[in-house]
Structures are given as C-alpha cells and as structure tokens.
Amino acid sequence: MSSDHPEPKQLSSSLRGVPAPDADESLGALVKLLTDGDPLVRRTALAHLGRLPVHDPHVISAITDRLSDDSPEVRAAAGRALGRMGSADSRTIDALRERLADKEWRVRFSAASALAQIAPSDPQTISSLRHRLADEDSNVREAAASALAQIAPSDPQSISALRDRLADENWSVREAAARALAQIAPSDPQTISSLLDRLADEDSDVRVAAARALAQIAPSEPQSISALRHRLADEVSDVREAAASALAQIAPPDPKTMSALQALLGDRGLTVELGSVCEAAYESMLLLLQKAAKEPPLLEE
C-alpha cells in the first residue's frame, strides 16, 4: 500500500546525513531540508531547528518562509519554531501576524503562541491578537488572551475585550482571560466586578484564576474581601488555597478574616502544587499579623 508520506524508517534514512542538532554544521543541513518535497521532512526539520539556539538571520528568514508553506502542519511547525527562539525581526513578526488570519486553527494558534513568546508590543500586533479573542476556535482565543497578557499592558481596548472573555463558553478561555487581566488590568470597578462574578464560576480553575487576579488588582474593599472569604469554604482545595492567599494580599487583619482562616488550620486538602490548604491558611494568617504589627493602633476617642 503506497503513501504520500515516508514511513518512520524512511524518514530516518532521509535525515541520517544530518549531524546532531548541537553541531554547528547541522544548521545548513536542516535549512536545506526546509525546502524538501515532503511536508513531513520539512516539519521534522523545523522541529529540530526549534530546539537550537538559532540567531543567524538567514536561518530565521528560512523558517519564516515556511509560514507560507502549502501544508498547514508545516506552517504551524514554523510558528512553534519561531516562538521557541523568543526573538524576531519585523519581517517575521509581520508574517506571524498574517498567520493569525490563517484558515487553519492550528496555524492561528501557533502564530498567537509565538507572538506571546516573542512579545512585540506594536499596536498592529496588539490589535490583531485582540481580534483573535473572538476566534471561532477556543484554543486560539485562549492563546490570544495569553499573548495579550505579555504585550498589552494597560491597553484599554484589550482589557475590555479580555473582560468580555470572562463570560466565554469555554472554561479554559475564561481562565486565560482572568490570568491576563491579573497582569495588565488596572484596579477599575468594572474589571473587579467581572472577576468577582468568576469566583462563582462552575469550573474550579476559573475560580482559582479569579481569586489570584483579585489578589493582584483588587483594592481592600468589603465586597472583594467578603467574596474571597466565602471561597474559603469552596469544595475544591485549590480554590480554598487561592482564596486564603488572596486574602493575605488585600484584606486587613480583621477578626472575621482571621477567624475564617483559622477554621482552615485543620484542612488537609492538597493543592495541585502538592501544598496543603492548612499551610496556605497559616501563612496567610502570619502575613496578616505582620501587616497588623506595622499598622499604627487606633486611638480611642
């Protein structure tokens, strides 16, 4: 039975002459394979190049050329390779930005992820990524949100678009939006209100992201503190841990908060990081006590 693609052994033979990826002479051999007639060979060469510390502009240019390859798998592989390199010239950034409108979701995802790693902060790239927040594919929306967190600090339009994604139908997009807002949003009432709504999200990862975002941007105001205290009784240990840590950041050392944290000192629930809720509660109480020690005592009238 014939196939358009070589078997693994055949592919191995076609690459057998290529030196080990850490050898200087391997670059030229791998670059030549980028124009091989078989897309599987081109994709494999890109994967190897993405693992190398490449700074040669001619090599980067050759990889950039593959962003317009006939094969969507090769275009996506080119985006991944460029993202791993972490830097790019204006031609490469322009080419990645064009791929944000590719007809294949995996290519759009790859381009958005690469731009997140390269982090160009020009208005055109920010605008293109913001547009991808409404992409039909949730993976692309998530990647766009993560990218904007890296390159769009305090951009009002991006913050507004990310706030809208907090109501996305896909939980991973909601989580990515909350994480992004934690990095770039100012402490404005509309963003805080949207994040407070996500503390009651049906997905625990979104609740965790919302709690951590509030710890970054929420002021010490009663509504945020009350909502986070309520999450100390969440059914998921990671949410309880995130709420405890957030309260240490924004709450005053008042009796209600200290009492709620004290109730968790016997909580042995483990978190994803393999810590325990009781440890988080204990550390939060210590931080609040340190905060109290630094505050001047109230004078009695």
Image: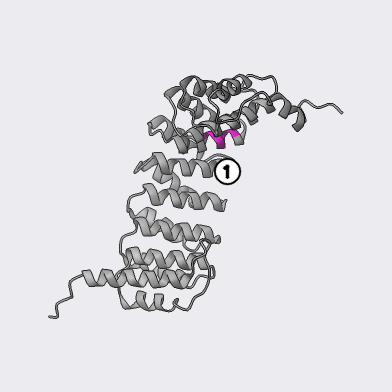
- List x then y, in percent, for residue 54: 49, 28
Q: Residue at x 17, y 71 (%)?
A: 296
Rendered-image quadrant of the C terminus:
bottom left
- List x then y, in percent, for residue 36: 66, 20
Give above or below for 245 relative to 168: below
Give above or below for 43 relative to 181: above
Rendered-image quadrant of the N terminus:
top right
Is residue 101 within the magenta segment?
no
Q: Which residues are magenta?
A: 107-111
Q: Quadrant of residue 63?
A: top right
Give above or below for 272 relative to 94: below
Q: Residues within 10 Å of mark 1 (few under 14, many from 20)?
A: some
Residue located beneath label 1 in the image = 139
Q: Give the farthest residue toward the bottom.
A: 300
Q: Note whether residue 277 is visible.
A: yes
- List x then y, in percent, for residue 281: 41, 71
Residue situated in front as seen by the camera: 122 or 223: 122
Kind of residue at disc 1: Asn
Element under disc 1: helix
| Side of 16 relative to 281 (left or right) | right
| Side of 178 relative to 255 (left or right) | right
* Colour logic: one colour
